[in-house]
Amino acid sequence: MTAPRMQVTASILDADMGTLARECRRALRAGSDRLHLDVMDGHFVPNITFGPTVIKRLRPVGTQPFDAHLMISEPGRYMDQFIDAGCDTITFHVEVDEPIEPTLLKIRRAGRKAGLAIKPKTPMSALEPYRELLDIVMVMTVEPGFGGQKFIYDAGAKIGPARGYLADPATGEVHVDGGVNRGSAEFCGTLAADVVIAGSILWKPGVDVAHEIRLIKALGDRGHADAVRAGGPTPPHGEWLRFAVLPVAGARGLAARLEAAGIPAIVLEAEHAAVPAQPRGAMEVLIPADDEKVASARFGDELATYGSAAFAAPGAGR
Ligand code: DX5
Ligand code: ZN
């Protein structure tokens, strides 16, 4: 298997703020590639979170990059503190009413990556003056301020063009923030998003965070691979469901046969809680919900030959 392309970064906005350091470690141990830190000032957005002091105290939770997302009216005024707090990337909003260029320059001079975030209704052309200075473009796919909102696909259409605004499209990063879930991750992949931010979906009770992160990456990478193969963005497959859980070789074999039959298949490490009888390392094979009938008719008998190691769990991909 090839290494995942898409990175997932956990936003701690909807984590338990009373035990923040523990929540950060939990997300990183579960495979979050970075931490996404949503700073809100109650002015730029109608919500208040935390500032550089808290970020500095969280810094020791891991060596993974800290991505600060500043939803504040005066990023310039506080930038030294965010740099000092140990943020690796610092992204603020193109909509702020103050000079932007000096702040981008300050971030870059400090050896950190500089980014601009863009709200759903702001046209991409707002980024035009800063092309030479952007290491990150963060496409907001919800109105900033709160977690748990629905992904706005019209705003998501900016993901593709966003790369053109990076100082170096090869090393720069396009981030997607807001409403990322199993449904929207594949779409982000088709448009070659580099980093997706996962917030509320990770903090719901009972969620296997590691599995959720693996799933988002797998769906994103599938979207990207399909788009590359097709030479341009492809429509996502919609809902995927868990078709089978198998030992590694069996899962890969089944996926290959599904693909040969024209049914897209994704293989990833299984969700342990959902398959308590499975040894660690069991793999699950996902297929688009639309293909379930055909796949069951064609491969149902074969699944039975795996005995207790295989079962279909329709709906698990939801
Ligand atoms: C919203 C924040 C997001 C938020 C995403 O203003 O910038 O980072 O945590 O949360 P979800 O994934 O729930 O949309
Ligand atoms: Zn954010």
Image (cartoon, rainbow, N blue to C red):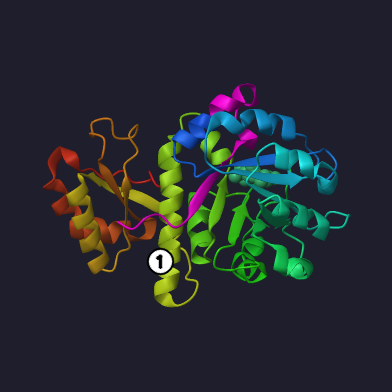
Viewer can see residue 146 = no
Element type where label 1 sits in the image: helix
Determine whether the beta carbon of the residue marked 1 sits less than 8 angstroms from the nearest atom of ligand 1. no
| Above-or-below relation of 180 to 235 | above
Q: Amino acid at mark 1?
A: Ala
- Residue found at x 52% / y 38%: 63
Between 24 and 247, the one nearer to me in the picture: 24
Q: Is residue 306 left or right of residue 101?
A: left
Front residue of 277 and 299: 277
20 magenta-colored: yes
Is residue 63 visible in the rendered image? The answer is yes
Res 152 quadrant in image: bottom right
Q: Is residue 18 magenta?
A: yes
- 245 vs 50, left or right, is left
Measured as percent of width and height from the top left, residue 8 is found at 51, 48
Q: Residue at x 42, y 48 (%)?
A: 215
Residue reaching furthest top? 18
Residue 66 x %, y %: 60, 42
Q: In the rendered view, does 289 fall on the left or right side of 155? A: left
Within the image, what quadrant is residue 269 found in?
top left
Per the image, the residue denoted by label 1 is 225
Residue 302 x, y percent position in the rendering: 14, 53
As displayed, is residue 18 above or below residue 307? above
Which residue appears farthest toward the left when viewing the image? 305
In the image, what residue occupies the spot 49% across and 45% down?
33
Relative to the observer, which residue lies in front, 296 or 180? 180
Residue 131, quarter of picture: bottom right
Locate residue 5, reporting x and y percent: 44, 57
